[in-house]
Amino acid sequence: MMCCAACGITEVDEVKLKDCTAIVVLLLTACYLVKYCSVKCQKDHRPKHKRDCKKRAAELRDELLFKQPESTHLGDCPICCLPLPFDPTKSILMACCCKLICDGCDFANQMREMKEKLEKKCPFCRHPLPKSQEEFKRNLMKRVEVNDPVALHQMGLYRNQERDYENAFPHFTKAAEMGDILAHYNLAVMYREGQGVKKDKEKELHHLEQAAIGGHPYARHNLGCVELTNCRTDRAIKHWIIAANLGYEHSLVPLTDAYRKGLVSKKDLAAALRAHQAAVDATKSPKRDEAAADRLAKAARQN
């Protein structure tokens, strides 16, 4: 039977014990080593338990941080259910439903509408497509008003592009609080560059880690660079392997360099290369190839 680490009282119907918690990189994390019956008991026992608590909480944080995400932060196209590519030109955001659609599904929908002479509609929710950028933003604002995290992040991007950092920051912050991974990454950039906020290394690291945990390969790669700067090469290599496994090509460069220096085994490098290629291949499909060919043909006609 569990008992309070400070006063020794056991857990019964009228006494509920709570896990000990610690702050690790701006996050409240439970160490799960001991329990307390009250905040007073936790404070009284803190001097004895502080070192073990922080050590265990950091270990648990690292377990979460270095776990290989199942997919990137972009996830899958909601129509064909294939992983979305990193290239932003190969997907399109629908303001009506804030779904990111791959170019293959968008192209297939356009071909169907042209063939059957149908009204142009969103391939996901079938809402009529906006006829202008102003209408697109009005549709997006409707999603912002209902606290859609994707719409909040997109509105933050618009403000950021206008260099209106003070208004971009609250949009990113709210989107990040609601779980938007891209918003975490953009907040990390703002804290690094001091855009609309004071430069803060600790907060930058916090948002980079949250983005990396959510499958953002750029954030993961950047964390590897931070660890390398701090002379923690083993942690840097772990980050780059995870990013490479997600299909991020730039992480293969430092991994190859580390292999030449004897810091990465041939087996680990080969596994990362195979996983990287598999992740890239998973984003390909005949319809996406058709869309790419159509883009090239249009570009050639314009030239």
Image (cartoon, grey):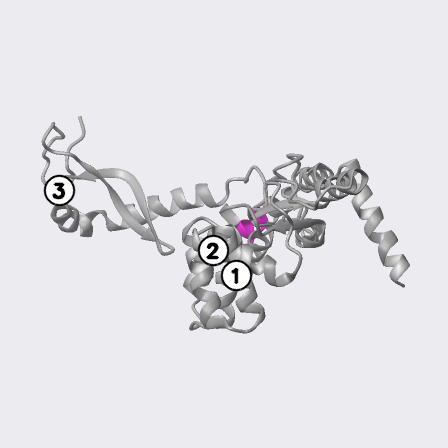
Q: Residue at x 9, y 34 (%)?
A: 9
**Left or right of residue 148: residue 97:** right
Spot occupied by residue 30 in the image (x, y as percentages of width and height): 30, 43
**The C terminus appears in which quarter of the rendering?**
bottom right
Q: Which mark is residue 144?
A: 2
Kind of residue at badge 2? Val
Regarding residue 255, the answer to whether it shows in the image is no
Q: Residue furthest top?
A: 1
Most foreground residue, 237 or 265: 237
Regarding residue 67, the answer to whether it shows in the image is yes
Q: Circle 1 sits in a helix, a strand or a loop, which is it?
A: helix
Q: Residue at x 11, y 27 (%)?
A: 13
| Mark in front: 3 vs 1 | 1
Spot occupied by residue 85 in the image (x, y as percentages of width and height): 68, 46
Q: Which mark is residue 6?
A: 3
Does the stretch in magenta take in 80?
no
Residue 185 against residue 200 in the figure, above or below: above
The residue stretch that appears in magenta: 230-239
- Give the mark, 2 or 3, whose residue is nearer the N terminus: 3
**Location of residue 119 by image quarter:** top right
